[in-house]
Image (cartoon, rainbow, N blue to C red):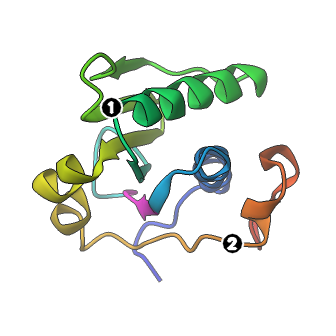
Amino acid sequence: MPKHPLPPATARKALDIAAWLKEKKADEISILNMSGTSPVAEAMVIVTAQGARHAQALADWLLKNLAQSGQSYLGMEGYREARWILVDCNDVLVHIFQEDGRRFYNLDGLWSHCPVLALDTASMCRPAASAAPAGIP
């Protein structure tokens, strides 16, 4: 059990984001519990895109789904080059990498001491709005 459990609303948001990105074929999806570790976010979602256009499409899809669910984001960096796109969703940071960028920056390794939130593969096969992670209202 982590010292700082992830707030339920943040866990749900991170899982929704992961599900939305999975719908558009994001690979290697990781959700890290950053509570008590990072002053800038409670959770981090890291995904791999198949190329620059795919990375941009994932970012566009994420922003569309955030808007449709009534959630905001603070900003986005790296969209033009699309090697590494960072979307600041307030309490959740989303990193969309092309494969070479993910290996080079190795955020998974940098934050390896953070607990990983398990992805519920069944919920990721349903539309994100109806997916609720186990134990989270």
For residue 113, above or below residue 18: below
Horizontal side of 40 relative to 118 (left or right) equals left
Expressed as whole percent of the image width and height from the top left, the position of residue 89 reads 49, 31
Q: Which residue is mark 2?
A: 120
Q: Secondary structure at mark 1?
A: strand
Q: Which residue is mark 1?
A: 85
Horizontal side of 62 relative to 74 (left or right) equals right
Amino acid beneath label 2: Asp
Residue 76 — which label? none
Frontmost of labels 1 and 2 is 1
Q: Nearer the viewer, residue 29 or 74?
A: 29
- Quadrant of res 51: top left
Amino acid beneath label 1: Ile
Q: Is disc 1 surrounded by few (<14), some (14 to 19) or many (20+) residues within 10 Å?
A: many
Identify the residue shown where x is 24% and y is 72%: 112
Identify the residue shown where x is 36% and y is 42%: 95
Expressed as whole percent of the image width and height from the top left, the position of residue 57 reads 52, 29
Identify the residue shown where x is 58% and y is 52%: 18
Q: Outermost residue toward the right?
A: 130
Q: Outermost residue toward the bottom?
A: 1
Expressed as whole percent of the image width and height from the top left, the position of residue 103 reads 18, 59
For residue 112, above or below residue 79: below
Task: Point out the stretch of residues depicted in magenta.
Answer: 29-35
Q: Is residue 31 magenta?
A: yes
Q: Is residue 54 magenta?
A: no
Q: Earlier in the sequence, mark 1 or mark 2?
A: 1
